[in-house]
Amino acid sequence: MTAGELAGAPVISALTPDHLALQKMVRDFARNEIAPIAAEFDESGEFPLETVRQMGQLGLMGIEVPEEYGGAGMDTLAYALTMIEVARADASHSTIVSVNNSLYCHAIYKFGTEAQKQKFLAPIARGEKIGAYSLTEPMSGSDASTMQSRAVLNSAGTHYLINGRKSWVTSGPVADYVILFTMTEPEKKHKGITAFLIEADQPGFIRGKKEPKLGIRASATSEIVYEDYECPVEHVLGEPGEGFKIAMTVLDAGRIGIAAQALGIAEAAYEASIQYAKERQAFGSPIGQFQMIQQKIADMKTRIEASRLLIYSACAAKERSKTSGERYTLEASMAKLFASETAEFVTDEAVQIHGGMGYSKELPVERYYRDARITRIYEGTSEVQRMVIARNELGLR
Ligand code: CAA
């Protein structure tokens, strides 16, 4: 869509009174309940189940899911605002919110049958159960369509037998249900991938090794191994062979969430830096009076606000797509690319402004720096986002 074609359509989503109320509610909750435990859970790597359940009770685990399916029935901007506020307090919690909302709930709401929504969507949107999304394999990351796992339909046509190993599954160690993408017809390449709704308590579902990570350490990540897992045909999400399209469609929504997460982390690091620059004395004055610190502050703030505009623009594009059916891949990728690189820039400068204290675990700045790094990698690396953006602009998709 060109700028001319956008005439009359909102290019940036505006905040309504409902958005402002949600933003305040999430900010207060995150500041009072999440921020105080963030360092402890980062250190232990334990999954913060209690606060995740509380977020479920507040409606934060299914923000865009209609109320009839247990969600809050709000829009994409509400989801982004939630991600920003939760990530400002703790990136790990926001990773859990992100996968549950945009990769899991969004996929089932968009592609699921009524029966699937009742069973697999409502309890997850209410936050009673936890959902995961499983695309990546040990030898298939950015090149997502080259997966080795297989699902074979039995002769009666009632069940698929699933075998294979999936890696980097966010919430994998605790998920109750998983959306699994696997090959049903390898000769058809990406058109031979099918999406399945998997129940973790069934035989053949084996949680593998938990990843020891640099950042977002309280967000549990693991391998999941499938050994002769029997999946009934009623649990195929969408049509057989439609899995790659579903995976990509859902990632467009997910990338807006990761952009918002990156912005939240950047904001936290920026706010800490402003406070420190006003308080910390050197050479007889607060360091904020030095031009070298001021240059950092100016660049940090400008990139943060530019990220916010790209995120709001992507939210507006996703809202438009609900009626137009048009993809918002470009807007989502630009927001994710810019916001994640901003988060890395801002958290790096925040460490620098704080000097030795930025490197110390006594302050949260070092955690922001570690947590920011994943946003350039998961749900599509910066390199993949640049590929998507350039292909879009060159008409190569
Ligand atoms: N929406 C809908 N359809 C899409 C699409 C999108 N955003 N992107 C591509 N498609 C469709 C294309 O239209 C095409 O369809 P047809 O064959 O019908 O024409 C088909 O998919 C293949 O498209 P491409 O030829 O562009 O596919 P490709 O193999 O070149 O891959 C890619 C493109 C962008 C690199 C893609 O593979 C990709 O995004 N890779 C990164 C994967 C990724 O983000 N992984 C992270 C997983 S989740 C995670 O991080 C862990 C977690 O738990 C949070």
Image (cartoon, helix red, strand yellow):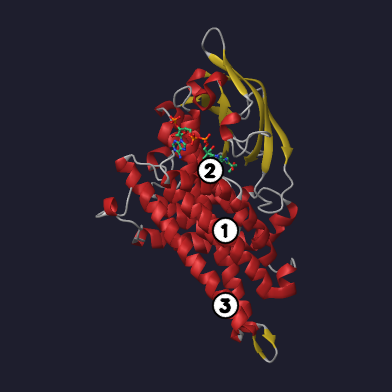
Is any atom of residue 51 visible in this view? Answer: no
Where disc 2 sits, the SS reads helix
> Type of residue at label 1?
Glu
Mark 2 or 3, nearer chain start: 2
Decide: few, some or many residues near mark 3? Use Cα within 10 Å; few <14, some 14-19, many ≥20. few
Query: In the image, 60: left or right of 344?
Result: left
Look at label 3 and name its amino acid. Answer: Gln
Which residue is denoted by mark 3 in the rendering?
295
Residue 325, image quadrant: top left
Question: In the rendered image, which residue does mark 2 sit on?
Answer: 100
Q: Secondary structure at mark 3?
A: helix
Q: Nearer the viewer, residue 11 or 383?
A: 383
Quadrant where the C terminus sits is top left
Above or below: residue 40 compared with residue 244: below
* Residue at 63% from the left image edge and 28% from the top image edge: 201
Q: Residue at x 33, y 56 (%)?
A: 11
Tag 1 residue: 341
Give the SS element for disc 1. helix
Label located before the other in sequence (3 or 1): 3
Residue at horizontal 61 percent and vertical 85 percent from the top:
290
Q: Which amino acid type corresponds to the residue marked 2 in the rendered image? A: Asn
- Which of discs 2 and 1 lies nearer the camera? The answer is 1
